[in-house]
Image (tube, rainbow, N blue to C red):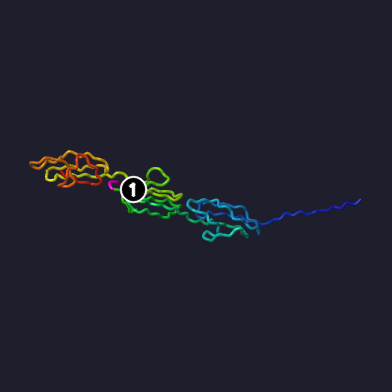
Amino acid sequence: LSVSWLIHAQFEWNVPSYTVTLHANDGTTAVSKAAEAVKDIPYAAPACPFAPRGKVFGGWSLTPNGTSVKFPTVFSGNTDLYAIWADVFHNVTLNAGTGTGTAVTSREKAAVDYILPTFESTGFKAPTGMKFAGWKVSGKTGLSAPGAKLALTGDVTLTAEYTAADVTVRFDANGGTGSMNPLSVKALSSTTLPACGFTAPQYKKFAGWSLSKTGAVIGSAYTFTGDTTLYA
């Protein structure tokens, strides 16, 4: 009796692989390791795990300031990949609202807060009898003050809003004697005029208030639109 054996040798391939490390490259401070790259096997572009504000991912580079790598590609050793970023811009439009002035649109980086401007810096003018109250930001409720920070997530319009101005009413004795303190009132609202505190000239009596030294009497109430002097 004879027995023969057929013996098969089994082998495992030991193919070198390399570590690919992803760098946020100012997107964030994080570093992430992608799946290993296998020698001589084309490596597909890894997904970007970083999401910095106001930036759009533009590909991977072999250096922090390099150009984008074309994938799939073959690596010959451990490799560092650096995210390439481009700034995102949004339109910011300044609108005079019911005031006067030409609307202005600027392109602003989304990565940094936009600082709301002062009303004076825009060149806009408030309607007669009114003053600037704040900015109405599209998509938001309430008013925002100049100097406030605004995170830009899309195009935005800032519309100037207004409120009645405070005006000063002064009094002129117009030939009489004495003095009267100025009066602070809200513009665009009917104001009851005060009694005359002056002493009338000899042989005359107070007839009312006028907008000029020789003008007609305006009555017992008046709506002011700006600083005004009333003459007895």
Q: State the count of labels.
A: 1
Question: What residue is drawn where x is 31% and y is 44%?
Answer: 163
Q: Measured from the top left, where is residue 148 in percent x and y?
A: 38, 48
Quadrant of the frame with the C terminus: top left
Question: What residue is drawn where x is 61% and y is 59%?
Answer: 73
Using the rendered view, name the quadrant where residue 181 is placed.
top left
> In this rendering, is residue 189 above or below 34?
above
The residue pinned by badge 1 equals 98
The residue nearer to you, when weighing 114 against 140, is 140
Magenta segment: 128-133
- Outermost residue toward the left in this view: 203
Q: Is residue 172 left or right of residue 1?
A: left
Task: Name the kind of residue labelled 1 in the image.
Answer: Thr
Q: Measured from the top left, where is residue 79 in percent x and y?
A: 59, 58
Q: Measured from the top left, where is residue 17 in percent x and y?
A: 65, 56
The residue nearer to you, when weighing 205 against 118, is 205
Tell me the chief SS of the magenta region. Answer: strand
Does residue 73 show up magenta in the picture?
no
Q: Is residue 8 left or right of residue 163?
A: right
Using the rendered view, name the quadrant where residue 70 is placed.
bottom right
How packed mark 1 is, by other alpha carbons closer than 10 Å (few <14, some 14-19, many 20 or more), is: few
What secondary structure is found at the residue carrying circle 1?
loop
- Outermost residue toward the right in this view: 1
Q: Is residue 82 left or right of residue 176?
A: right
- Outermost residue toward the front in this view: 216
Q: Measured from the top left, where is residue 160 in percent x and y?
A: 35, 48
